[in-house]
Amino acid sequence: MPKLSAQARARKIRLLLFDVDGVLTDGKMFFLPQRDKPQENTQLSAQGSIEFKGFHAHDGVAISLARLGALRTGLITKRFSETVALRARDLKLEFVLQGIHDKGTAFKRIVTEAGLGLDEAAFVGDDIVDLPAMRVAGFAIATQNARADVKREAHYTTPHPGGEGALRDAVEFLLKAQGKWKKVLDTYLTEHPTVQ
């Protein structure tokens, strides 16, 4: 059976799932020590630190564009982070799974919950922990900064690295392959006339 092209795979996609660290972010994690009561105790609290991450505005717009193009979205990440939970709420992501060690099984569960087939779902990843989800996805996307093993198994590699608009690249590729880009762009600009 002939292998499907990236565009042919992209045309079928109705659900876009993605990793966080290295996809929505550049992969760096910042931790700020958290003190219980500095005047009484200089030891770190039980949590130890406050984690914070940086997200790119282009990726935020990508989620709005995806929604206008009838693409459902969500994330699957191995780590648990309140920062990620906050960003997911801000973006109104439909599916949010944190603390997941088996991303392949989680991916299949979300696809089933969405009432779709695996060939209708894409996954964006950057490291080997993402391979189980990428291997079952109808369309596997690697970020430009992905590890070589991940890029080898991807159907498409984004021009930008994670945290620098990689998710936007993925959304644009999908919408253009589906012939929706111009309509989605026009709708977005009509709804957000002050966007520059």
Image (tube, rainbow, N blue to C red):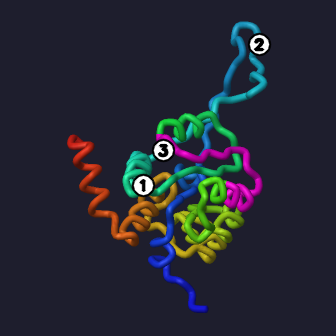
Outermost residue, top side: 39
Q: Nearer the viewer, mark 1 or mark 3?
A: 1
Up-down relation of residue 169 to residue 195 (above or below)? below
CB atoms at circles 2 and 1 under 8 Å apart?
Answer: no
Q: Which residue is mark 3?
A: 55
| Alpha carbon distance from label 2 to label 1 | 48 Å
Tell me what residue is drawn at x 67 percent, y 69 percent: 136
Label for residue 162?
none
Residue 34 locus on image (x, y percent): 67, 23
Residue 122 locus on image (x, y percent): 56, 64
Q: Nearer the viewer, mark 2 or mark 1?
A: 1
Amino acid at the residue labelled 2: Asn
Q: Residues within 10 Å of mark 2 (few under 14, many from 20)?
A: few
Label for residue 66?
1
Tell me what residue is drawn at x 45 percent, y 54 percent: 164
Q: Earlier in the sequence, mark 2 or mark 1?
A: 2
Label for residue 41?
2
Q: Nearer the viewer, mark 2 or mark 3?
A: 3
Tell me what residue is drawn at x 66 percent, y 46 percent: 97
Amino acid at the residue labelled 3: Phe
- Which segment is the magenta one? 91-109
Q: Residues within 10 Å of mark 3 (few under 14, many from 20)?
A: some
Give left or right: position of 100 versus 26: right
